Structures are given as C-alpha cells and as structure tokens.
Amino acid sequence: MTSSKTNIKSYTYDELVTRFAEMGLKKYRASQAFEWIYKNRVRSFYEMTNISKSERGMLDANFSLTFPVILRREDSHDGTKKFLFGLEDDHAVESVLIPDEDRLTLCISSQVGCAQGCRFCLTGRGGFRRNLAAYEIVDQVLGVEDFLESATSVEDREDGPAHDGGRQRYITNIVLMGMGEPLANFASVLEALKIITAEKGLGFSPRRVTLSTDGLVPEIDKLAKSGVKVNLAVSLNATTDDVRDRIMPVNRRYPIKELLAACRRYPLEPRRRITFEYVMLRDVNDTENDALRLAQLLRGIRCKVNLIPFNPFPGSDFGRPDDAVVERFQKTLADRHYTALVRESRGRDISAACGQLREQEDATDATVRD
C-alpha cells in the first residue's frame, strides 16, 4: 500500500533542514537523520537512538521510511548479478551489479520502462510506465549494498572494503544506464544524484558516478548548469543522421550536430572526459567509413569511446558484428589517437547486458532466486 506521507528519502539534506525547521526541529537533527538513513540504513525512525523519543514520534507521524524490496536476484556465470526491485505501486525495476577487477559497478534505473524507442534496446519494447522518484533511484543503491553486507561473512569483512560511516562501502561506481532515460526524469535524477554524491548522503565521489543519456540536448545543458559534476556518457550509436534517425528516434529532435555542440559546451573538469557509447550493429553502423566519420565528428571533444557489440534478443532486427569488424573499428579510432575500448558484455545469460533490462510482468509474484 502506498503511504500518504512523504518519504523522508525524497529530501536532499538542505531540503530536510528546511522541513525540520518548519517542524521546530534543530538543524543538527537533519544531519543525524541523514546519517541514520544513508550510513546505517535504518528501517524505522525509532532506531534513531540519538534523537529523543518524542522527536522520533514526530518524524514517524510526518514521514514514511521505506526500504527497498528485492523480489528476485539472478546470478550470471561471469559474476554479474541482476536485481528486481519491487516498488510500492506494484511496478518493478531492474539493477545490475558488475564486478570488474578492482571495481564493483552498480547500474541503476531512473524510470519504469522507457519512452525513447531505440530499436536496438529491449527495455523500450515494454513501453513507458512512469518516472522513478528520487528515493526510488537511491533505494537501488541502498538495497544492493545491504544485500552485499548481509552476504559477506565476518571473515571476509576483516580484509574487505573500507568502512564508510556506520557501514561498509562495497559498491565503487554507479552508472545511470539501467531502465529509462535519466534526463527525461531530470528533477528526480538530479535530486538523487545530490543524495548519492553528498557527504551527508551516500558519499560517492562524483568521479565515480556516471549519467548516460540518449542525447536530450536541453537537459544536457541544464545538467551542465546544475552544479552536479558527475561523469557524462552519451549514447551516439551512428555517424549520420539518416542512420541515427532510424535506430534512435530522439535524433529527429536533436540531430547529431546539435548533440555534439551540446557536448562541446559541457564543462569538463581537468582530466575528465565525455564517454561516447557506440552500440555496434552488423551492416548498419560498423563499417570502416563509420569509424572514419566518428573520428571526424568527435574532433575537439575531450572524450573516449566505448564500443558495445550488440546484444541480440528474440525478435531483434539487428545482428552482432564479427569480432574482426569490431577490432578493425577500434583500431581505426586508436590510429587517430582516440581511446576506444570494447566493452565486454556482462550478464548476457541472465538478460542483464546493455539494453536488456525490463520490468518483469510477474513482478508481484516473483521470489528471490539464489
């Protein structure tokens, strides 16, 4: 049942200070509440033991404090884990945890479904349901970290990740590349990013948080002016408007020239780069001429390129290019002094790879699967 009370995790720290002041509570109570929620991950206001009993009752009367529910977990043979999170209105979203050497990256969702309609993406085929609230975005991080802590033995913890406040930090990187277009849910995503990166929130370094977009130009400009300095990744996927129009409808509103102009305007701190994601589709955008055009298009932009061989799914119109084609494409870019990485598809056996996330139709009946 959906609570009529506002979820306390919907507030940024500054917003909570203001709300507490309206309730007659001191500023430091907001700091204490944030620490209990994000460092200690309490499930009840009555667990906030350094806040008086009467004030805890006041919080309970004015706010809700929910905790994410993992309906299902699937484990890939390569170590990737996919989580299905149940939402209060019986919708669900998926998140993916990807291990890679010294990193543990969590890919989180910003919408239930997606309205962008990219033809190579399975997520969009299920349609768009709704935007996630800020706390529903943040909850995916809290839920996975809680799972990791409960799944880790005491012996492992002794030599494990460093402590972060009251709990340990297991996840090292966060990417908003799951279900949905983050910039189409701008207000909630921005609020979530502030909580994720705030010292009084989850405390992730902005350098370890990446937002991926299909190319909503006005929102890229708004993000640039927002003061939230996370990494930007742009899903480009074509070198001509004709091809991009066919595979990414967003290009009809914001063609390549406008998109790249926004990328050139985007303020980058020293040693930061924009990442261009390029899903490679056999005989569509994987030719030598495409590689040459891409090198020309990106001139003057401090960037790197992630090449993503297409992850096929039933009913897809596209195929995966041969490894030799991918290697040639990569070499063409490298020869022109671009950092071009071939992104290994992880979790394909559990439909957790790029473009494969979706809302499960049977979410309300799902159970956790080890």
Image (cartoon, rainbow, N blue to C red):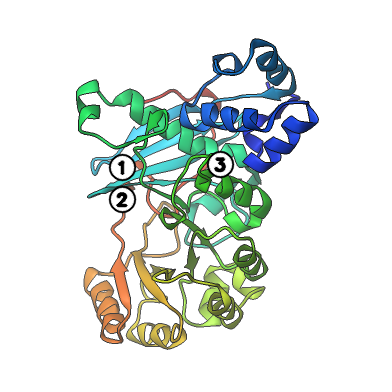
The residue tagged 3 is 137
Residue 277 in the image: above or below residue 147? below
Front residue of this view, candidates 42 and 104: 42
Looking at the image, is mark 3 or mark 2 earlier in the sequence? 3
Contact, CB < 8 Å: mark 1 with mark 2? yes
SS for callout 2: loop
The quarter in which the N terminus is drawn is top right
> Residue 238's spot in the image, x, y percent?
47, 76
Gap between marks 1 and 2, in whole Å? 6 Å
**Alpha carbon of mark 3 to alpha carbon of mark 2: how far?**
22 Å
Residue 317 seen in render: yes
The residue lying at 64 percent from left, 11 percent from top is: 53
Q: Is residue 47 left or right of residue 290?
A: right
In the image, 353 versus 207, the foreground residue is: 207
Along the polypeptide, which appears first: circle 1 or circle 3? 1
Q: Quadrant of residue 260?
A: bottom right
Q: Nearer the viewer, residue 238 or 171?
A: 171
Residue displayed at 61% across by 58% down: 183
Q: Is residue 9 above or below residue 338?
A: above
Give the amino acid type for the residue marked by disc 1 in the picture.
Answer: Thr
Residue under numbered circle 2: 346
Q: Quadrant of the C terminus?
A: top left
Who's the residue at 40% across and 43% down the image?
96
Q: Secondary structure at mark 1?
A: loop
Please give the residue where the numbered disc 1 appears in the rendered image: 80
Residue 78 x %, y %: 24, 44
Say if mark 3 contacts mark 2, CB within 8 Å.
Answer: no
Query: Which residue appears at 47% of the width and 69% of the height?
Result: 269
Question: Left or right of 317: which side holds 255?
Answer: right
- Residue 299 picture location, percent across and down: 43, 86
Cα distance in 3D space between marks 1 and 3? 20 Å
Q: Tell which residue pokes out farthest to the right in this image.
A: 22
